[in-house]
Amino acid sequence: GENVEQHPSTLSVQEGDSAVIKCTYSDSASNYFPWYKQELGKRPQLIIDIRSNVGEKKDQRIAVTLNKTAKHFSLHITETQPEDSAVYFCAASRKTGTASKLTFGTGTRLQVTL
Amino acid sequence: DGGITQSPKYLFRKEGQNVTLSCEQNLNHDAMYWYRQDPGQGLRLIYYSQIVNDFQKGDIAEGYSVSREKKESFPLTVTSAQKNPTAFYLCAVGGNTIYFGEGSWLTVV
């Protein structure tokens, strides 16, 4: 099955700096790569996703890049703010019938300090 | 996300008891999922369903059971066979993009 590795497990940056979180996946058939933000005690919220026919996607301060050959994808957050502090999860999946079975990384705890 | 309702939010289970977590959606999605999250860890897939009257095991199905009698509903039963049931349980829906409910906290007492 799919295996997703995520690094680093914790990341501390100063407000205004950039943060980068990296993930690798094992199944070359995976074609969908979402990123979720989870605040303490809350549900994961989708913040950005990318499909395998695209190399990069950007939404305001957040961007995701995908390298299919190397089987890795990354989340980039620019101009970080204190409200960006949370745990971020990457995931990989491929569609099976009507379902997309997500395999998650173990998460990165991002702390943005003033 | 607002169209996915999980209940109860908090649940306590005694040893040897079965408990059922409810998940209802009004988003008209065929696919529904149950994930388990342990403190400080990622999410692991328990069961998923692609359509009414269908469900398939995920990575950690042992000690759990599900049913899908209606498109809107996908309840999860945590049986007494699940040895470490204390966790945060998340229901999700979607085929191309996956959205999560607010979760249910289950604690064994």
Image: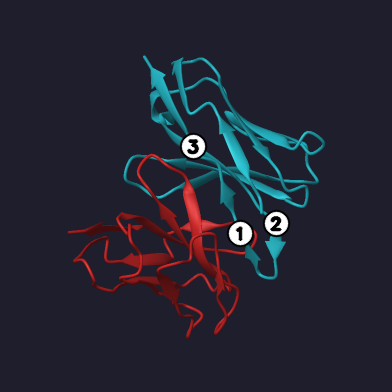
Chain colours: A cyan, B red
Crowdedness near tag 1: few (<14), some (14–19) or many (≥20) residues, C-alpha within 10 Å:
many
In the image, residue B94 lies at what x, y percent? 57, 64
Q: CA distance from mark 1 to mark 3?
A: 17 Å
Q: Amino acid at mark 3?
A: Gly
Q: CA distance from mark 1 to mark 2?
A: 7 Å
Which of pointers 1 and 3 lies earlier in the amino acid sequence? 1
In the image, residue A49 lies at what x, y percent? 63, 44
Q: Nearer the viewer, residue A95 or A114?
A: A95
In the image, residue A8 lies at what x, y percent? 53, 26
> Which residue is disc 1 drawn over?
A101
Q: Residue at x 58, y 74 (%)?
A: B30
Which of pointers 2 and 3 lies earlier in the amino acid sequence? 2
Q: Residue at x 17, y 59 (%)?
A: B109
Label 1 sits on a secondary structure element that is: loop
Q: How many marks?
A: 3
Mark 1 vs 2: CB contact within 8 A: yes
Question: Quick check: A18 above or below B11?
Answer: above
Q: Are marks 2 and 3 on the same chain?
A: yes
Label placed on residue A107:
3
> Which residue is disc 2 drawn over?
A94
Residue B51 in view, yes or no: yes
Which of pointers 1 and 2 lies earlier in the amino acid sequence? 2
> Along the horizontal axis of the image, is A97 left or right of B6?
right
Q: Nearer the viewer, residue B15 or A80?
A: B15
In the image, residue B68 lies at what x, y percent? 49, 81
Q: Are marks 1 and 3 on the same chain?
A: yes
> Along the horizontal axis of the image, is B3 left or right of A40?
right
Q: Chain of mark 2?
A: A
Label 3 sits on a secondary structure element that is: loop
Q: CA distance from mark 2 to mark 3?
A: 20 Å
Q: Quadrant of residue A5?
A: top right
